[in-house]
Image (cartoon, coloured by chain):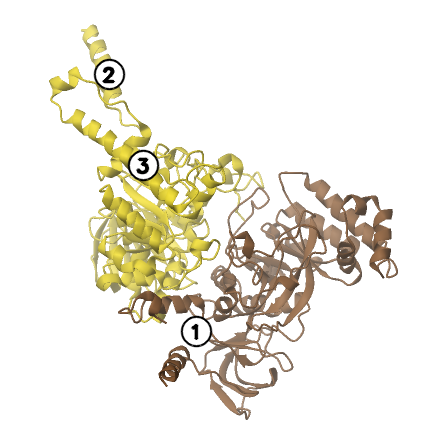
Amino acid sequence: MIKNKFLLAFIILTSNSVFLESSNLVIKNAKIYDGIENNSYQGHILISEGVISKISKTSIPYAEKIYDAKGKIVTPGFIAPDTQIGIIEIGALSVTRDDEASIYNIGFSIHDAFNPNSVLIPWNRANGITSAITLPRNTSSPIGGLGSFFLLDSNLDISSEADIVMIGRFGGSGSSSRAETLALIDDMLSFVSSLDKKDISSDASIDEVIDDSSLASHMDFKPRDVKALYSLIHDNLPLIIKAHRASDIIKLIELKNTYDLNLIIMGAQEASLVTDEIIENNVPLIVNPINNIPNSFDELASNINMTSMLEKAGATLMFNVSRSHNYHLIRQGAGIAVANGMSYGGAIKALTSNVAKTFNLNNRGSIKVGNMADIVVWEDDPLEPSSMPEKVFINGLDTDLTTRSTRLRDRYIKDLEKPNTYRN
Amino acid sequence: MKNIYIFFYFFSLFIVAENYEPFESTYEPLPPTNTIFRNASIYDGEGNELNNTDLIIKDGKVVAMGVDLPSSSDLIEVDASGKWITPGIIDIHSHMGVYPAPSVRTSSDGNEATSPVTAEVWAEHSIWVQDPQYALALKGGVTTFHVLPGSANLIGGRGVTAKNLQRNTINSMKFPNAPHSLKMACGENPKRVYGNKGQSPSTRMGNAAGYRKSWIKAQSYLSRLDEYEEKSEEAKELSYKPTRDLELETLAGVLRDEILVHNHCYRADEMATMIEIAKEFNYKITAFHHAVEAYKIADLLAENNICAALWADWWGFKHEAYDMVQANIAIVDQARNGTGCAIVHSDDEIGIQHLNVEAAKALSAGIKAGYDISKARAINWITSNPAKAAGIYDQTGSLKVGKNADVVLWSKNPFSIYALAEKVYIDGAIAFDRSSGLEPSSDFDVGIINPSKNRIEE
């Protein structure tokens, strides 16, 4: 009996928000930034079985449950394109890191290391990030390592898209000339370009082609590595290369054109010096709009106006952050970009649909009929980092916005008469 | 006659040599931009919000603040309707100059990580005055910053407070008469750095022993010094002055309450230990820095009159930074009936440019936690509170008649992400003006991408 009383009290204490459990829901009176159009519109969003089934600007569609957004801003859930969510819990604690491999290199996938119970997931979700691309650390090879897409729904049965992108880096390294790095990437791509489906039909046949190639042998390629490289050329696998210097960006664009790569440049702190080349060759960029530090000799042109200059020129932009864990701060970066001249709608797209398009995340990243209902209702302007989500729907489900951080906070502001270990 | 002059010349040299105080500030403000701001909204850094208010700055000082102030012909009139004014922002934790940009080995001079106690080193002797980061911080409204050595060591050395007016020597940037500070560090960093070298400290208990051993040495040095100084002039001639020791001079300066202790410390239990050590050796801790767990001991900090200099939300990069709560700053601020001292710091070359936004996040989290905190109070976290922790509050950190005219004019309410610093004044002289394009650029910026332009000139 006493036990039950405690249980009841526990339930009352912990369930301070009411969850909308329904297969059929309408979010009414929303100010919708859909991630497609630059401007917002007033409307009602019907969600059925996790999918956006209707968007009405006039009459409110019928649904079992209604959530009244009361005119607040509603956006697609933000997608963070450059994170380590799920594979690094504590940066300086190597036993909590799964971002590095020792045997596999180019073909190393972090997908199976993903921890859906990481505290970073509720934390970023409560700040409006509904999904993320998780990337490994750069390997010893200038291109290599595969990143995956994950839904941040804290479900042990994870929703993901494995190995959707390869990463790489190019620039000043302090060890060998960037000219050698470029030559090496060129040779690696040339090697896999010469292969056909038959060559990679089995690990045994891949081992044969490795043995026949001095480069592949020297690089100690494994079949997984060759398969990953093959996907760059033959499956149009997106390749994110971190590079900054204007001349480096030009070289990468040449490489893209030689091998018809699906190239995305990350960092790109000198992109404003080579805007025309970037636009003409359709290279999406992942930039950190708040980073104006000339942090290396490759980044001398770093400029707080870069993001708005690139937008005006027509570049496809996505955002990352400079520090770990708070990947949601891409919206602070977006706000800074807008403060310095970027359009508001453009900033919302950079946080949503641009990522979905670039990485072929079909059915996500925008509020349109047929898409999965990853939707955030904001207390206020989402680009003000002091404004928080009021509701976060992932696959149409109303998610828990409690975080370890809010729980710890409550321990130190409530029930203070009890010893801290006996509080909530 | 001539000989007498020669005598006086040499005599004066002798005097100078005996009494020369090295590393004094030679700071000179820019020529004053005497100005009246009309119809501004003002957060004064004293907890007040004033609307439709005029502010006059003249000859380097705040001269008047009020409604419909009379103008005079020597004042530039600035229409501040719809705009906001705050005191100049102060960052209590910066590594500008000691970890300059570009971040390269040759000018990475923040950690003398060769011995766990290096109280003898001074951050100001590492500072690179051509760091391009100062100008970026200025555009974010930062008028004063406090530079500390890094946190590799238990006792890392002296910090320095500087005006954000870039000059080609550090002495000409130093905040006149600002007290020196001492950087100490708890926790993972010193025990990792020295533990990896196979020497003490390799544990937190090793850390604690390290501080205590140093203070014992400092006490003994100080008593020898006191003993000598208390002697009569005749007795002094008959005895020897204790040999100068740079390490112990710094520590003795702390024990004499002349040097302010700034202590990097994340965990609540370690901060409590550091408070015990401070009491054991009778020195004061001015502020704990980074203090991710300050909220767990907010009352203890308030009772001991210790500030906490904090990030709004950074966490998780190491174990001692795992328990972050966004309301940390608000909880510290509200401790013991609002007597706590909370500071938003950057420790970061990007964060320093947006301390107003960092304060906005911290305020929002505080309000969500149920506290009734005004924006006018929250601005203290980046103005008057850091001024107090740097020991310069009598001169700057709030807009009061007679104080230095360190002023920022914002395009919008500074708690908005869209607010930009439009004009920044240091000692009543305009140092940055967004509309006219007036902004400093370091020598580093000159002609480095395009020889005929400065680095970020378009």
User: Circle 2 sits in a helix, a strand or a loop, which is it?
Assistant: helix
Q: Are marks 3 and 2 on the same chain?
A: yes
Q: CA distance from mark 3 to mark 2?
A: 38 Å
Q: Would you call the spot at circle 1 few (<14 residues within 10 Å), some (14-19), or many (20 or more)?
A: some
**Dots 3, 2 in contact, CB < 8 A:** no
Disc 1: host chain: A
Q: Nearer the viewer, residue B340 or A105?
A: A105
Q: Are marks 3 and 1 on the same chain?
A: no
Residue behind mark 3: B213
* Kind of residue indicated by mark 2: Phe
**In the picture provided, is A170 more to the left or to the right than B228?**
right
Q: Which mark, residue B14?
A: 2
Q: Is residue B219 above or below residue A368?
A: above
Given the image, what chain letter belongs to the residue carrying mark 2? Answer: B
Q: Tell me what hue chain A is rendered in.
A: brown
Q: Is residue A263 left or right of residue A334?
A: right
Q: Position of residue A26 (x, y in %)?
A: 53, 87
- Three-letter residue code for mark 3: Lys
